[in-house]
Amino acid sequence: MLTRPFFLSNLATVIDRVHSEVPADAPERASILNGMRFLCAEDNALNAEILQAANLRGAGCSSVEDDAT
């Protein structure tokens, strides 16, 4: 479970737990976030920085303004 405040390291830990049951013969990923996609309501500057960090680790991140319609 992800809690607030949200940290990229928390996300990586949760994802790592989920993927810990991956078969041993599965190819290794360069980053635990590589190839994953996220959509985030960008309601503050910290969330924008988290998305940038996730992008640098190989995740595909999209954001929308919190008040977007």
Image: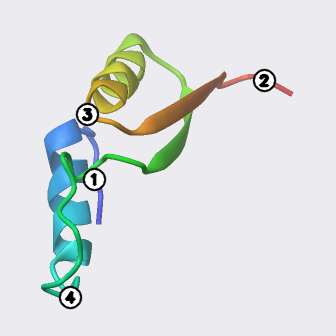
Which residue in the protein does label 1 denote?
3
**Where residue 44 sits in the image (x, y, percent)?**
45, 16
- The picture quadrant where one finds residue 42 is top right
Local SS, label 3: loop
Nearer the observer, 63 or 36: 36
Which residue in the protein does label 3 denote?
57
- Judged left or right of residue 61, residue 68 is right
Quarter of the figure that contains the C terminus: top right
Q: Residue at x 28, y 44 (%)?
A: 4
Q: Looking at the picture, does residue 68 appear above or below residue 32?
A: above
Which residue in the protein does label 4 denote?
23
**Where residue 12 sits in the image (x, y, percent)?**
20, 51
Please, what is the three-letter code of the amino acid marked with disc 2? Answer: Ala
Please, what is the three-letter code of the amino acid marked with disc 3? Answer: Arg
**Where residue 34 sits in the image (x, y, percent)?**
32, 46
**Where residue 5 sits in the image (x, y, percent)?**
25, 38
Task: Work out whether mark 4 precedes mark 1 in sequence or the reverse, and give the earlier one.
Answer: 1
Which residue in the protein does label 2 denote?
68
Nearer the observer, 17 or 66: 17
